[in-house]
Amino acid sequence: MKVQYIGLEEINGPLVFIKTPKDIVFEEQVVIELKNGEKRIGDVIRLDKDITTIQVYQGTTGMNSKDIKTEFIGTPLMIDLSKQMLGRVFNGTGKAIDGLRRN
């Protein structure tokens, strides 16, 4: 079940903190949308009664705690695997960052 939350409590390095919404789980994938429409991926790394901690894989540079939409996807971050991935370099969200193009 997708849950959307608006605003953040705090930003500290690659971590963001929000008041804990209902019906979210540990390691759940999170899509964070900035005011300009840019989306960043993260996941729930700590789930307390009052505050939830989210690690943002693309960093928090340019984020404002008031103008953020956070959507909890309901599943952990997953990527498809294939033999063409062997020897490649990927970022934390599973996108190739080695500059190679393979079909």
Image: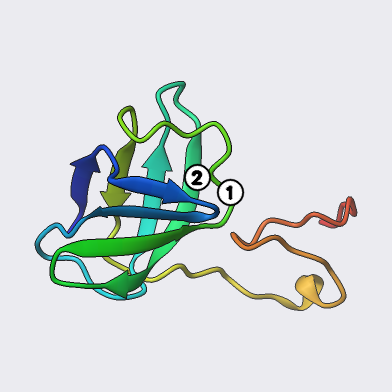
The residue beneath circle 1 is 59
- Cβ–Cβ below 8 Å for labels 2 and 1? yes
Kind of residue at badge 2 = Arg
When the figure is inspected, residue 78 is found, relative to residue 54, above or below; the finding is below
Residue at 34% x, 34% y is 68
Closer to the camera in the image, 33 or 53: 53
Q: Decide if residue 84 is on the left or right side of residue 51.
A: right
Tell me where residue 75 sits by quadrant. Answer: bottom left
Q: Tag 2, which secondary structure?
A: strand
* CA distance for labels 2 and 1: 8 Å
Q: Tag 1, which secondary structure?
A: loop
The residue beneath circle 2 is 40
Closer to the camera in the image, 86 or 12: 12
Per the rendering, the mark at residue 10 is none
Closer to the camera in the image, 43 or 99: 43
Image location (x, y in percent) of residue 83: 77, 78
